[in-house]
Amino acid sequence: MTKDISVIGGSAAGFFAAYLLAKQGLDVRVFEATERIDPSPRTLIVTRYMQGLLGPLGESAVINEIRHFELFTDGRAATISLQRPDMVIERSNLIRKLAEKAEASGAKILTGRRFLSLKPNGKSLKFAVSCKGDREPAEESTEILVGADGGFSKVARSTGWPETPTLPLIQAVVDLPEDLSPDTTRIWFIPEETPYFFWLIPHSPTQGVLGLIGADPEESRRSLERLIEEKSLAASNFQSARIPLYTRWIDNHRKIGKSDVYLVGDAAGHVKVSTVGGVVTGLRGALGVVEAILNGGSSRQLQALRRELDRHRLIRRVLHGFTQADYSGLLDMLTASTKRCLGLFPRDEAGKLLFHLLLKQPRLLLLGLRALL
Ligand SMILES: Cc1cc2nc3c(=O)[nH]c(=O)nc-3n(C[C@H](O)[C@H](O)[C@H](O)COP(=O)(O)OP(=O)(O)OC[C@H]3O[C@@H](n4cnc5c(N)ncnc54)[C@H](O)[C@@H]3O)c2cc1C
């Protein structure tokens, strides 16, 4: 077993992979482009599935719990109560905790090191890393390289993976409306504004994030401002970025000479395209890559992740075909038993959720097929 692994990108997926590998006694270095492990704040919502992956470590990043979802479309409303609450997390806390854990397990974290390029070198890989203040890039060597450097992965580009399309996501911190309880997330389906949805996720008793995923950044910003005005909300601190659009599974392993290169997290496009959530799937991808490294290539975790991401792609294809009338029909079909089902199965188990939902409400299948066609 080789013992020399370099992870490019010190964020959720990279540090989780580094922690798991270092825990196995492997020699792991993490190269992070920013000067310090001090990520900008970002409010995220994840299901309890994260708990199963991270255990108590995940708990420390939790800033709020969500017990209900209120869905709105064209004057209609429906409430889903979750059997196990979702967790609202502060991304910067999660990343710092994962970094501490990786370091405590023996991984070496090198900040202010930007990966530039790579080339084969006998049994290993050589890669160039720029360091602020140095006139020339440093040359590093590794046997296995893990690219966890986000949606615009330089590792992926240098290794010949095709560019992943991305989507603009924008959210702003707002004061919660008086009629919204901090344990409730609001979702609006307004297809003439976005084929995705708007959300308002409380992260404290008084504030939350209001956001949307769109197709065009300028248009998304305008749509968000319209909703802020319509709901008379006070907004500040806009957070935005582009996130990968999962269009199909790509093999996240390549051989360069005799060495292995893996991609993980946003770099591999491991994002649920139904909701554009990438934290849990990125952590699952990290688990899968570690499994593949330890097993010499195979990973059941990666196979399961592929199935999960493909199911979310199907859901997204259906929802992308939805008109306003379809969303109204969808909310009308949410009977007490379908709502119970939606509250029981987390969206990170899409297969189970869809199976039970269609059993309870077969008319949903017709609605979905019509939208697909
Ligand atoms: C506003 C917003 C809200 C979101 N909300 C949710 C949500 O509610 N739930 C959810 O599940 N997901 C959400 N997401 C998506 C989620 O945040 C991402 O999928 C996840 O954080 C990706 O983690 P990652 O570790 O793969 O990559 P990133 O967090 O993108 O980390 C990549 C790291 O690589 C470093 N890096 C980049 N290039 C180099 C280089 N050349 N050399 C060295 N280092 C490099 C970067 O500095 C960074 O630290 C949201 C995204 C955004 C933008």
Image (cartoon, grey):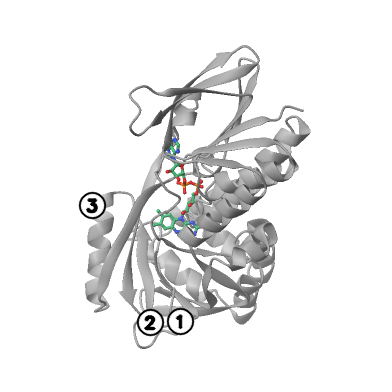
Q: Amino acid at mark 2?
A: Thr
Splitting the image into 4 quarters, where does residue 348 fall?
A: bottom right
Question: In this figure, which residue is indicated by the disc labeled 3?
Answer: 218
Residue 223 pos. (x, y %)? 26, 62
Q: Earlier in the sequence, mark 3 or mark 2?
A: 2
Splitting the image into 4 quarters, where does residue 27 fall?
A: top right
Front one among 150 and 328: 150
Seen at 55% across and 75% down, the residue is 334
Question: In this figure, which residue is indicated by the disc labeled 1?
Answer: 182
Q: Are marks 3 and 2 in contact (CB under 8 Å)?
A: no
Front one among 301 and 115: 115
Residue 49 pos. (x, y %)? 65, 62
Seen at 23% across and 68% down, the residue is 226
Splitting the image into 4 quarters, where does residue 261 fall?
A: top right
Q: Amino acid at mark 1?
A: Pro
* Residue 12 - label: none
Question: In this figure, which residue is indicated by the disc labeled 2?
Answer: 206
Q: Are marks 2 and 1 in contact (CB under 8 Å)?
A: yes
Front one among 197 and 4: 4
Q: Residues within 10 Å of mark 1 (few under 14, many from 20)?
A: many
Q: Amino acid at mark 3?
A: Glu
